[in-house]
């Protein structure tokens, strides 16, 4: 199900929130507290405020606890039993939830904005800017920080199957994006967002 050029595109959000926080002493990233709420809840709010029509959230480490503690009503929650294999498995699970048959698009989305749960410095304005780069169902765009590619990443629905096939290990879509670098629209977001990750104990200082 697609849209004609006169319709506004339907952009879904895909939040990768399965990480176990190995370098944080095994504290699942989705449950780290930020502004009084679990980080996953904050990240879902960012995607919604950025204009995503529907948000799919991939859970892995402590998925049961995340479902209990985080207010994720209205989201499509996707369990990734293979989350320990890395981000690639979560990206595959998330894309499969958007188009379960590998072709038929259950979400009705023309593109998806992929975000990572451990980047709270990236807010709604960066999501809006990247989503606005959509031109067609084979769109490919990414936020840039001083010209360097980062997240969020916009992937048109026509590319989902190929992206999923190339996603493995901790690289996520990195290999695919490298191969298709010439097609990527870079959207500078360095003036409205900070692309740090919450990976190590010292990074917890970024949380409020």
Image (cartoon, rainbow, N blue to C red):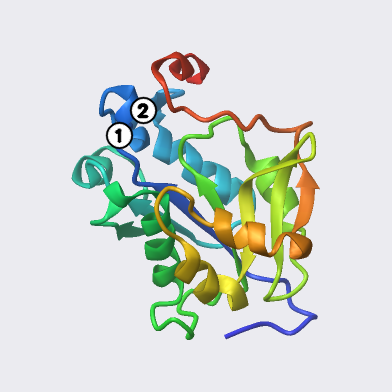
- Figure check: 196 above or below 81: above
Identify the residue shown where x is 49% and y is 56%: 14
Rendered location of residue 21, percent (x, y): 33, 32
Q: Residue furthest left?
A: 64
Q: In the visual, does 31 lie left or right of 2?
A: left
Q: Residue 122: horizontal and vertical position, in percent?
A: 61, 36
Write down the residue under mark 1: 28
Residue underneath mark 2 = 32
Q: Look at the image and tell me whether residue 3 can be seen.
A: yes
Task: Kindly indicate whether the residue at mark 1 contacts the one at mark 2 (C-beta within 8 angstroms).
Answer: yes
Q: Residue at x 40, y 71 (%)?
A: 96
C-alpha gap between disc 2 and disc 1: 7 Å
Please count the marks in the image.
Answer: 2
Quarter assignment of residue 202: top left
Name the residue located 77 percent from the left edge and 59 percent from the top edge.
Answer: 133
- Circle 1 packing at 10 Å, graded few (<14), some (14-19), many (20+), is many
Q: Eyeballing the image, is 10 above or below 60? A: below
Mark 1: which secondary structure? loop
Q: Residue at x 76, y 33 (%)?
A: 190
Q: Quadrant of residue 5?
A: bottom right
Point out residue 37 in the picture as x, y percentages from the top left corner. 39, 29
């Amino acid at each position: 199900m697609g849209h004609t050029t006169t319709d506004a595109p339907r952009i879904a959000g895909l939040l990768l929130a399965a990480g176990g926080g190995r370098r944080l002493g095994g504290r699942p990233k989705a449950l780290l507290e930020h502004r009084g709420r679990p980080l996953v809840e904050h990240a879902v709010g960012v995607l919604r405020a950025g204009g995503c029509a529907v948000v799919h959230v991939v859970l892995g480490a402590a998925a049961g606890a995340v479902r209990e503690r985080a207010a994720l009503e209205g989201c499509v929650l996707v369990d990734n039993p293979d989350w320990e294999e890395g981000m690639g498995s979560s990206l595959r699970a998330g894309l499969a939830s958007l188009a379960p048959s590998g072709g038929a698009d259950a979400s009705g989305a023309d593109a998806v904005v992929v975000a990572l749960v451990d980047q709270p410095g990236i807010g709604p304005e960066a999501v809006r800017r990247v989503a606005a780069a959509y031109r067609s169902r084979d769109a490919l765009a990414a936020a840039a920080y001083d010209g360097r590619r980062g997240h969020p990443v916009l992937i048109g629905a026509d590319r989902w199957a190929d992206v999923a096939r190339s996603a493995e290990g901790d690289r996520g879509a990195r290999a695919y994006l490298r191969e298709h670098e010439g097609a990527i629209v870079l959207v500078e977001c360095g003036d409205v967002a900070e692309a740090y990750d919450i990976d190590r104990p010292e990074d917890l200082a970024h949380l409020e």
